[in-house]
Image (cartoon, grey):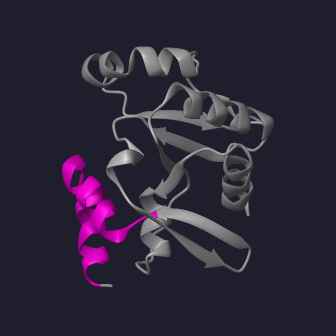
Amino acid sequence: MFIHKVCNAFEQAKILYAVVGGYAVALHGAPRGTLDIDFVLRWSLENLEKAEAALKALGLVSVIPVDAQAIFTFRDEYIKNKNLIAWHFYNPVNPSEQVDIIINYDLAKATTKTVQTQSGKIKIMSKNDLIAMKRISGRLQDLEDIKSLEQV
């Protein structure tokens, strides 16, 4: 599975990360479909550069013409003035392979847990921290995810 390829690449690169979004919701036991894989990183230039290199090695490219240095340097401006909350990557050969690096949240604020799946281990954000992150977002899908998470 693609999610395992990305998580393994992040583990090998020693990136501090957690899966959030639809995959994390599903891995907490609340079924939810999603196409892209959302990640939160421990906010540092080093982690961003490692993530960019790992994704590039998997054949993914950034949708927007920026690199890790620009995301790190202009993070506040991107969030405030461009409403950019995720750095989006996709595979031009297989467009279903998509990854978002959430830039408006720092993993330092959260706890993680490792979930064992049939194909391997995946590090996800803890349920309480995932709910808190989604509450801050306030998007309709996130509010629905909160309801689902609170029932499991």
* Viewer-side residue, 44 vs 119: 44
For residue 61, side relative to residue 126 (left or right): right
Establish if 148 lies above or below 21: below
- The quarter of the picture where the N terminus appears is bottom right
Q: Quadrant of the C terminus?
A: bottom left
Q: Residue at x 79, y 36 (%)?
A: 57
What range of the chain is rendered magenta? Answer: 125-151
Q: Is residue 119 left or right of residue 72?
A: right
Above or below for 121 versus 41:
below
- In the image: residue 56, left or right of residue 127: right
Magenta stretch: helix, strand or loop mostly: helix
Where residue 43 appears, as percent x and y from the top left, is: 44, 35
Rendered view: 97 above or below 87: below
Q: Residue pushed farthest bottom?
A: 152
| 140 magenta-colored | yes
Q: Residue at x 48, y 30 (%)?
A: 44
Residue 34: percent from left, percent from top:
50, 60
Q: Is residue 135 magenta?
A: yes
Tell me where residue 4 sits by quadrant.
bottom right
The picture quadrant where one finds residue 112 is: bottom left
